[in-house]
Amino acid sequence: MIRSAVEAADSESGGRVPVSVKFRLGIDDEHLTYIDAGRIAEAEGAAAVALHARTALDHYGPPARREAIAELKDVVVSIPVLGNGDIATADDALSMMRDTGCDGVVIGRGCLGRPWLFAELEAALCGRPPPFPPSLGEVADVIRRHVALLVESSGDVVRLAPFRKHLAWYLKGYPVGSELRKAAARVGTVDDVEAVLSRLDRDAPAPEGAAGFNRSHTDPLRRVALPDGWLDDPYELPALGSPLAVHSGG
């Protein structure tokens, strides 16, 4: 599968599109596959590999296992190894690179409602002081830009119900009040979003420890759904049935 993706990217783009591969430790602690996955990706021409240092069973419950990223880095030597899991601040990224020797990091839940995290990372990696956390007014400006981009990509008519979760992440921890949070949870149009933003205290500072607030997935161990017979024989590919029956675990 990796070889096919690399060959297709090379042939269709003149070799200008790198293919990276992200994977977890494995299905569970009895089926750890990340070392094999890394070796295969390296051998088949991947430009980089990224390890989310949890099993599929772990979901997002236990802390990411940094020692596994270090182990993968020792094995995969010709392409970059990127670490993923529990990176909410620039310091988290720097400490992961220091502790594991990985070449970089992949950001997931840590940037939800906090796109300025990437500016903080850039500053940290370049040895500059981090930018000052945004005030609530600055967050409101980012939200307006986010909505404008949604409208631009979707046309004049856009349903913003799916945006509600992003709005909640943006406002997480700020002194907004329960009434406005309820209104944010009901937005469906651009005007609805603007009605919420217009009532915010633009001077309210970023809350202390905002980066550590949980966003999105916080689930503990979750059962892994596999096709019938998937683990019976590692060399026999069972019938998968409908592709809709199997989905990724991030």
Image (cartoon, rainbow, N blue to C red):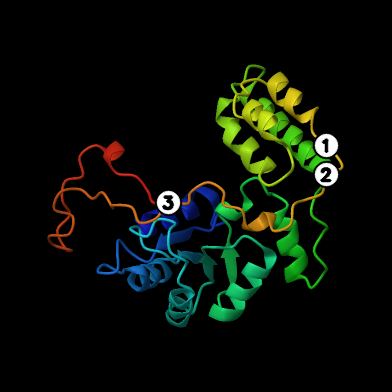
Which picture quadrant has residue 4? bottom left
Q: Quadrant of the N terminus?
A: bottom left
In the image, which disc is placed on residue 219? 3
Q: CA distance from mark 3 to mark 2?
A: 31 Å
In the rendering, at what x and y percent does residue 19 appear? Answer: 49, 58
Mark 3, Cα crowd under 10 Å, few <14 / some 14-19 / many 20+, is few
In the rendering, at what x and y percent does residue 105 appear? Answer: 58, 65
Q: Nearer the viewer, residue 69 or 184?
A: 184
Residue depicted at 62% across the width and 38% down the height = 168
First in sequence: mark 3 vs mark 2: 2
In the rendering, at what x and y percent does residue 237 appear? Answer: 17, 54
Residue depicted at 43% across the width and 59% down the height = 61
Looking at the image, the residue that sits furthest to the right is 203
Q: Is residue 84 above or below residue 103?
A: above
Looking at the image, the residue that sits furthest to the top is 157
Residue depicted at 31% across the width and 68% down the height = 33
Q: Is residue 70 left or right of residue 4?
A: right
Q: Nearer the viewer, residue 63 or 175?
A: 175
Residue depicted at 35% across the width and 58% down the height = 56
Q: Secondary structure at mark 3?
A: loop
Q: Amino acid at mark 2?
A: Ala
Find disc 2 in the rendering and name its residue.
Answer: 204
In the image, which disc is placed on residue 201? 1
Q: Is residue 138 left or right of residue 16?
A: right
